[in-house]
């Protein structure tokens, strides 16, 4: 599913051996060798620990941040074979109660975080403890982030020269011609070949199942008998795989903005559902702009705002802004606003200014960033490798064409751009994984917490409902009539109250609870440049 920028939901800052084996891990069953290999690797990691020390100068971390590495097998079926190193970061529990300076808070262990993706980097997560909304959690837990396999410094994956990744300006037709489709098919085939050529025989081992196994090795290396974990977006999926494979190793788990784990959904149908959901969120944004027509002048109805957007896209197709921003860059910038409503005022401001003759805000917000090309290429490569390896995909473009042509008639905003991002999976050279049926029996897993916004487009709400049904004893907290992707530690105090109660005290509602939506953002006048846009790179912004 489509990836987005990292986000700090709290605001605009940057975010042994197995005791039991599930049915899929019985001797002779698929994955039995990998399950045994995970136990071997975890025991080895428990003995070695993590040699945390000062972060390198290149990482430019604050003094409280410590860095280290954990070795994991490339192939868990052969735990004594090639090893790769995962980069890990930590800020120790402060023991300081932000509500009572005289009270010393006892440590509860490590809280490990993943922001999603696939391809998202959780390395900077421990910085989230600097934010007020996270100080209570940071008082009791060592905040631990890491770069998953393939990401950043953790045996990075690459599929093409970063210099050629994300070329701009580019087109983004909502109803592409046959010739355009043929061009994109050729690009998808070339990209899949590039992944195989640049990553080699290791490509097949970048999977969600291996991410779950890596998490158990990291748990052991941190000296934790049981794992406390928070996963956002895609992080909820391999977190759910972990809960299925290693239920006795779970202490507490938070699933923030849940992926639908139904094996029939992974990943092709999840992408179709995401494209459909983004149309609804795009409508929400257009209605908000229409409500503030006196500020932006983009139209007094959602339909009129769509007209303004289409006018801008047509102008950019004819003459890219600054030679950098074409229709695809416009769409990408507004897609980010579909993830996070704190972008709404800035995107509306940029669109309004552009249509009034000032392209600078739009160039600033939507233009390419060459300095980040290598990181973006790596993230996209991991995304592609994991999703393509995880499950079967249609190999005949006629299937993609049929399904998405139908969908684009009612949901044109993201549909075809989502196709082009995922189309390399149709021509993938590596073998596909057998999808694990995420499911736990009553009493098998400690109570877990699922957080979801009702109008989240990146991970539609049905995914949270499905995960809730599959994880016995889970509790679902819903932010009603809201659509921000990733709500833990954000502006909703009700949601944060449930999060704190669970992580700090182990308290949960009986089965479900609901919170009223957080307030919508306030508009910014088109000529007001004094307020900064939310920063795209952050400690804990979920990514899909």
Image (cartoon, helix red, strand yellow):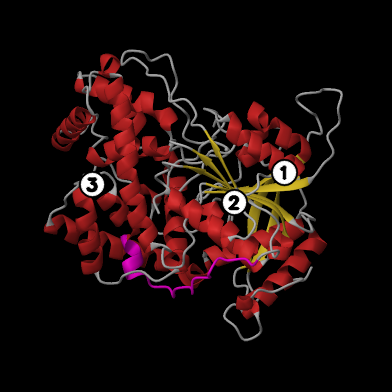
- Identity of the residue drawn at 22% across and 26% down: 301
Q: Nearer the viewer, mark 1 or mark 2?
A: 1
Residue position for label 2? 147
Pick whichever, 377 or 354, lies toward us: 354
Pointer 3: residues within 10 angstroms few (<14), some, or many (20+)? many
Give how far apart the Cα atoms at labels 1 and 3 are: 43 Å
- Identity of the residue drawn at 20% across and 57% down: 406
Above-or-below relation of 392 to 212: below
Q: Quadrant of residue 108?
A: top right
Quadrant into which the N terminus falls? bottom left
Residue position for label 1? 507
Give how far apart the Cα atoms at labels 1 and 2 are: 30 Å
Give how far apart the Cα atoms at labels 3 and 2 are: 34 Å
Above-or-below relation of 26 to 128: below
Image coordinates for residue 94, horizontal then vertical, percent: 79, 33
Q: Label 1: state its secondary structure.
A: loop
**Residue 412: which disc?**
3
């Amino acid at each position: 599913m489509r990836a987005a920028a990292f986000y700090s939901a709290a605001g605009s800052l940057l975010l042994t051996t197995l005791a039991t084996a599930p049915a899929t891990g019985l001797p002779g069953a698929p994955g039995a060798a990998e399950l045994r290999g995970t136990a071997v690797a975890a025991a080895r990691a428990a003995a070695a620990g993590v040699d945390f020390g000062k972060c390198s100068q290149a990482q430019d971390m604050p003094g409280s941040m410590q860095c280290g590495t954990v070795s994991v097998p490339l192939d868990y079926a052969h735990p004594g074979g090639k090893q790769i190193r995962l980069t890990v970061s930590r800020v120790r529990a402060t023991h300081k109660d932000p509500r009572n300076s005289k009270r010393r808070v006892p440590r509860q262990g490590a809280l490990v975080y993943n922001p999603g993706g696939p391809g998202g980097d959780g390395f900077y997560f421990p910085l989230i403890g600097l934010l007020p909304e996270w100080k209570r959690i940071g008082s009791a837990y060592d905040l631990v982030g890491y770069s998953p396999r393939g990401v950043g410094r953790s045996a990075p994956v690459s599929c093409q020269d970063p210099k050629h990744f994300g070329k701009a300006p580019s087109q983004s037709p909502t109803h592409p011609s046959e010739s355009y489709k043929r061009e994109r098919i050729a690009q998808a085939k070339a990209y899949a070949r590039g992944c195989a050529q640049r990553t080699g025989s290791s490509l097949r081992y970048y999977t969600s199942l291996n991410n779950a196994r890596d998490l158990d090795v990291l748990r052991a290396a941190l000296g934790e008998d049981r794992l406390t974990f928070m996963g956002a977006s895609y992080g909820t999926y391999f977190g759910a795989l972990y809960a299925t494979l290693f239920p006795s190793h779970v202490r507490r788990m938070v699933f923030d903005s849940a992926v639908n784990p139904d094996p029939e959904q992974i990943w092709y149908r999840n992408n179709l559902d995401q494209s459909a959901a983004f149309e609804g969120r795009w409508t929400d944004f257009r209605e908000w702009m229409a409500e503030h027509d006196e500020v932006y002048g983009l139209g007094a109805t959602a339909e009129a705002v769509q007209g303004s957007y289409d006018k801008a896209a047509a102008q950019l197709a004819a003459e890219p802004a600054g030679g950098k921003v074409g229709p695809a860059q416009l769409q990408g910038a507004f897609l980010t606003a579909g993830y996070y409503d704190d972008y709404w005022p800035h995107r509306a401001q940029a669109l309004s200014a552009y249509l009034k003759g000032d392209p600078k805000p739009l160039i600033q917000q939507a233009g390419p960033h060459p300095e980040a090309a290598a990181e973006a290429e790596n993230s996209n490569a991991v995304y592609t490798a994991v999703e393509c390896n995880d499950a079967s995909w249609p190999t005949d473009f006629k299937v993609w064409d049929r399904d998405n042509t139908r969908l684009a008639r009612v949901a044109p905003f993201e549909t075809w751009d989502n196709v082009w991002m995922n189309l390399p999976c149709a021509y993938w050279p590596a073998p596909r994984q057998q999808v694990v049926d995420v499911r736990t029996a009553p009493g098998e897993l400690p109570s877990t917490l699922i957080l979801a916004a009702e109008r989240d487009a990146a991970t539609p709400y049905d995914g949270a409902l499905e995960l809730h049904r599959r994880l016995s004893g889970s509790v679902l907290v819903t932010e009603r009539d809201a659509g921000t992707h990733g709500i833990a530690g954000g502006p909703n105090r009700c949601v944060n109250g449930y999060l704190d109660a669970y992580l700090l005290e182990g308290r949960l509602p009986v089965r479900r609870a609901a919170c009223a939506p957080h307030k919508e953002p306030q508009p910014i006048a088109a000529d007001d440049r004094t307020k900064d846009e939310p920063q795209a790179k952050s400690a804990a912004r979920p990514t899909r």
